[in-house]
Amino acid sequence: MSDVFKALADTTRRTILDELTDRNGQTLFEICARLVTKHGLGSSRQAISQHLDVLEAAGLVETRREGRYKFHYINTGPLEPIIERWLNKPEKDADGRLDGGVDTDRKRGAT
């Protein structure tokens, strides 16, 4: 899980994942072009390639070769343990009882 957090810690890598979410299956050239035109990121192809390597090592990006082209695809699988650990757990109230994730202010009738 630490590789995933390390990969997500960088703004450029998160932007690359945003781009792959928007349009999955891009080549390095396409990713670089979209980062420049949509986000104003002027990173070199080598720098973006290194970012993609980190994302791939964390399992967040998968690749497929077709001839001389390498296509990059987002893989959200490594995020599932994070979601299960922190986002899908029922919340406990002050007494340690499960409250089913309902906002405690709303349960008390507060606005």
Image (tube, rainbow, N blue to C red):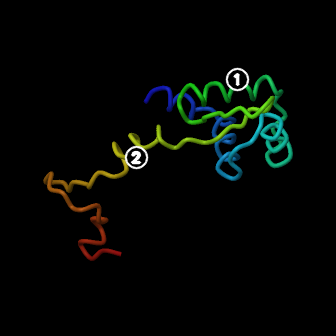
How far is disc 1 from disc 2 in space, using C-alphas? Answer: 27 Å
Query: For the residue labelled by badge 2, is the local secondary structure a helix, a strand or a loop?
Result: helix
Q: Earlier in the sequence, mark 1 or mark 2?
A: 1
Of residue 41 and residue 75, the one placed in the foreground of this image is 75
Of residue 47 and residue 68, the one placed in the foreground of this image is 68
Picture residue at 79% right of the left edge, 32% below the top: 69
Residue position for label 1: 50
Query: In the rendered image of this protein, does residue 28 appear above or below residue 76?
Result: above
Where does the image place residue 102, in percent across and percent down from the top left?
Answer: 29, 65
Where does the image place residue 40, in percent across and percent down from the top left?
Answer: 83, 42
Residue position for label 2: 83
Residue density around tag 2, few if under 14, some if 14–19, many if 20 or more, within 10 Å: few
Residue type, label 2: Ile
Picture residue at 81% right of the left edge, 41% below the top: 30
Where does the image place residue 107, in percent across and percent down from the top left?
Answer: 25, 71
Residue 91 falls in which quadrant of the image? Answer: bottom left
Q: How many marks?
A: 2
Query: In the rendered image of this protein, does residue 9 appear above or below residue 86?
Result: above
Of residue 50 and residue 97, the one placed in the foreground of this image is 50
Task: Determine whether, in the image, residue 30 is placed left or right of residue 88.
Answer: right
Q: Which mark is residue 77?
A: none
